[in-house]
Amino acid sequence: MLYLLLAIMCSSLIAIIFKYSETNDMNRYAVTTSNYFAAFLVSLIMSVKNDLFKPIMGILNNNFTKEIKSVVLNNNGLFSETSSFIWAIIAGIIAGVFFFLSFIYYQKSVREDGVGLAGAFAKLGTLVPMSLSIILWNELPTFIQWIGILLSIISILLVNISFNKEILKSIRLTLILLFVFGGMAEFSNKIFQKYAIVNYKSLFLFFVFLTAFFISLYFTIKRKSKVTKKDIYVGLLVGIPNLFSSFFLIMALEYMKTSVVFPIFSAGTIVILGLSSLLIFKEKLKTKEIVSMMMTILALILINI
């Protein structure tokens, strides 16, 4: 549970820093690019320190394709060290693309559909890894945990969506793609953790953020917007919690069911952001936000019974 709480704290810190950057009209792509740079640099240092590049010498003589059949298709154990290295590269690059696409569609959804709907669909993307883990690996929660999960999902909807007759008409392709890409970005953490040696998580995250960095850098250059030192500094600052949010999430998945981790990860972030809005940004909480926070706390209790 400690790893999940740390992941929630890091995720919340990302949102708080991004809120600061948005309210100060900073270059969004420049902030994102420097954020990915900091994340992949720190994960590279961690990988080198733990000697995780050592298996590269045995790649040519490795039976990765045979291990795919045994580990992935037959769900038999974990990859060897060299295969875990290869899996970290493959899964990391794919995840990096999903990470960036979810960011792009989040920005697009905020612009087209408003913060409320965009926030709800981004957080409800946790239903993707939750559902896939149940289907693929039969990671079924207990009855009490189901109640906690349901409460956490309701709390996400409650705090983000204004329920009216026009709500269904507001759901567009952009929101659906945000839901899918965001969910797949989160699911990629599970895909790595499920099959690879968990010690290679920093190497996996290195390839995730390296991929996202190059894509983000391309769009930053293409837009030709002014980049300030403040954009870069804020991006570097947010890169650290961005890295450790995924780092601790992978560790939480090692000890807890996916169907439990992801709903609480999202709902828990709502609680922290609600408190930070009240204490840091001096914003008054609405009744539905207070109710949502109480439901999330109750959900946390039920899931840990």
Image: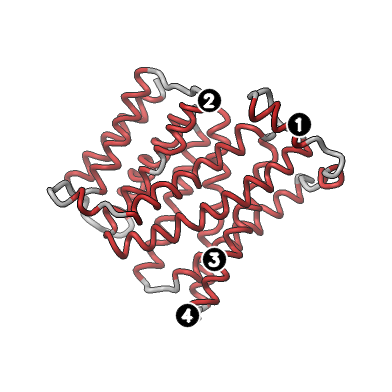
Q: Position of 142 compared to 56: left or right?
A: left
* Mark before the other along the chain sequence, 4 or 3: 3
Q: Which residue is mark 3?
A: 216
Crowd class of label 1 (few under 14; some 14 to 19; many from 20; radius 10 Å): few
Which amino acid type corresponds to the residue marked 3 in the rendered image? Ser
Q: Nearer the viewer, mark 4 or mark 1?
A: 1
Q: Which residue is mark 2?
A: 137
- Please tell me whether residue 260 is drawn above or below residue 31 in the rendered image: above
Name the residue located 68 percent from the left edge and 24 percent from the top edge: 77
Asked whether the beta carbons under mark 4 and mark 3 sit within 8 Å of each other, the answer is no
Determine the secondary structure under disc 2: helix
Quadrant of the frame with the C terminus = top left
Q: Which residue is mark 1?
A: 66
Q: Nearer the viewer, mark 1 or mark 2?
A: 1
* Mark before the other along the chain sequence, 4 or 1: 1
Q: Which residue is mark 4?
A: 225
* Mark before the other along the chain sequence, 3 or 1: 1
Name the residue located 76 percent from the left edge and 49 percent from the top edge: 49
Looking at this view, is 238 or 70 the one in front? 70
Determine the secondary structure under disc 1: helix
Which amino acid type corresponds to the residue marked 2 in the rendered image? Trp
